Amino acid sequence: MDMLVSMLDATFRVATPLVLAGLAGLFSERAGVVDIGLEGKMLAAAFAGGAVAFIAADPWLGLLAAMLTALGLSMVHAFACVTHNGNQMVSGMAINIVAAGITPTLASAWFHEGGRTPILPTEGRFRPIDLPLAETLQDVPILGRLYSDVISGHTAPVYLTALIVPLVAYILYKTRFGLRLRAVGDNPHAVDTAGVSVARTRYLALACNGVLCGMAGGYLSIAQSSGFLQDMTAGKGYLALAALIFGKWKPWPTLFACLLFAFTDALQVRLQGVPLPIIGEVSVQFIQAVPYILTVLLLAGFVGKAVAPKAIGLPYVKSR
Amino acid sequence: MSTARLTSLPRWVDLGLLPFLNLSAALIVSGLVIALIGENPFEALVILVNGAVGYQEAIGYTLHYATNFMFTGLAVAVAFHAGLFNIGGEGQAYVAGLGVALVCLGLPGWPWWSVLPIAMIAAIVCGAAWAIIPGYLQAARGSHVVVTTIMFNFLATAFMTWMLVDVIRADGQQAPQSAAFPPSTHLPTIQDMGAFLGFDLPRMPLNLGFFLAILTAILVYLYIWHTRWGYELRTVGTNETAAVYAGMPVPRLIIVAMVISGALAGLAGINEVMGVQHRLVMNWTGGVGYVGIAVALMGRNHPVGIALSALLFGALYQGGSDLAFEIPAITREMIVVIQGLVILFCGALENLFRAPLEAYFKPKTV
């Protein structure tokens, strides 16, 4: 029970940035713009968040800076891919590489701590929040334990994320903007014919993408750890992309894919050096590889079928 | 993703002026980043150039880095010609290093010239093996090769960590790396070759792999533009539907393109692992696969262009280390920034200057 509780607790913490980045990718890809730049945008946001939260000693200002930074990079992506019909893969890759280079460069130039930002003071970080009655309900069997140890005691961005998932689902399926966004990703010509600007819709989608991606990055440096570390995203952006594909470009399934991947991560930490029945000791690397293997199998159509938005990856050019 | 795009631009503008403008834009933004750090960009440029080509060892290092980038750049270019964006060069090269290491460790006492062909085959097979699955999945099941190659990069990291930690780590050693290769298997360095011809050269990592890279570039050129297979490859990349109607075996061509791409990336292992490191170490690739993307994009996917841009990136890497040494405020990661900006301006924002240039050079109608 203790192990399960701590694993579930860890799952929520690890899943939060994945969910935020996955939903960020969802906005962009449902609008037809591939975003492999999630990784770089998260990293840049994590740096900006860590830096501003340290200077201002305020986590919310840090989070705002993180969101603005990722938003800026999303606009670069939009400028290249929507305005100039550039290759979306190449643009995303460029953002990843620039972010991987510029964050340690600026960090060591400005803070002189070798590619990281200074450790945040307590008031510069998001602190765990105890939900009401968490103490009192602790002794209630199972449910009380789940409430006080798994649900309660996370930081504000975790709860914010829990609210964002239904919000994104609502925007995507119940609002006019969501309808247009999905249409732009499936059939931009039809949207154009209906008199809605494809470019404007894609820019808006990428703006939402930037804000969410910035939250994901900010969470890493301000809530999960106290400060920015070089390459601290460590592939989480790509993992979020995998979760998005695994979730078939839909909000709720993407959330579950993120939780699943986060759970394998929590599992892998616990399984290090522990021999299992029958198969013996499983190598850590194998468990780390599981999300990637699953994604490849899914993409190959061996585990269900992932159908991408139809116009994904294609720049929209009005035929003359 | 086709590279054989129709353009109304004169050839010298398309192949000369346009890449120059794109590169200049990337360098100007890089200069702004250096200014943001509070250093003088012009001073940095002087140190960078001097560090890259200013003395004998510098040139040796520049050419050595360029060798790796040529292999990975050619890898990206071959896939590009088939309309595929192979981001997996990093993983393919990494795994190929394992093949090279196993051959070198397994043939102690053999002279290098007899080990080299076997090691090359091992590098080719391992690199190709890591690319064939994404290639097959793209061709047969329509899984996008960009996403699968990204996944395969992570799988390569996990697989190689496991190999280095649990399987081939040398006995009694803490660091996750293989035993040192027998000295007889080391590729001759430029110093050895110079001594053979009577020149006295300083010690530098430049080795036989450099000449191998030039030979490979020539072969790739012949393959893409002077064989039937290359013609088919370019047809698939330019217009897949036309290729189908022409009766070309498109799925097979896609797989072959990925296999060749992976094999080319794998050859970087010969230069780096067999030529310089002389043992298999963790993350020996250090991003060469990603630099290959920038090199291919800037070199317009042509072997001559790739050789030139590989040289430029080699100079950036070598000059960048000197720069980091001379101006401590600028770290080695600054090179990565420049690399990313080159990909942005030469790749994603390729049309930024194209449209104005096309308007300017439009044939005058009377």
Image (cartoon, grey):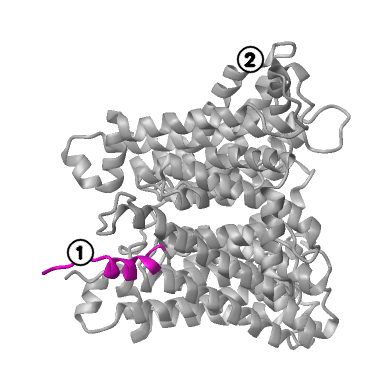
Q: Left or right: where does residue A273 sit relative to residue B256?
A: right
Q: Position of residue B87 (x, y in %)?
A: 50, 49
Q: Identify the mark at residue B113; answer none if there is no mark.
A: 2
Q: Identify the residue at image location x=57%, y=82%.
A: A163
Residues rendered magenta in the picture: B350-366
Q: Identify the residue at image location x=27%, y=83%.
A: A196
The local secondary structure at tag 1 comes to: loop
In front: mark 2 or mark 1? 1
Q: Residue furthest left?
A: B366
CB contact under 8 Å: marks 2 and 1: no
Which residue type carries mark 1?
Pro
- Inspect this view and state whether residue A216 appears: yes
- Provide the residue designation for mark 1: B363
Which residue type carries mark 2?
Trp
Chain of the residue on which disc 2 is drawn: B
Tell me if residue B314 comes above or below residue B192 in the rendering: below
The local secondary structure at tag 2 comes to: helix
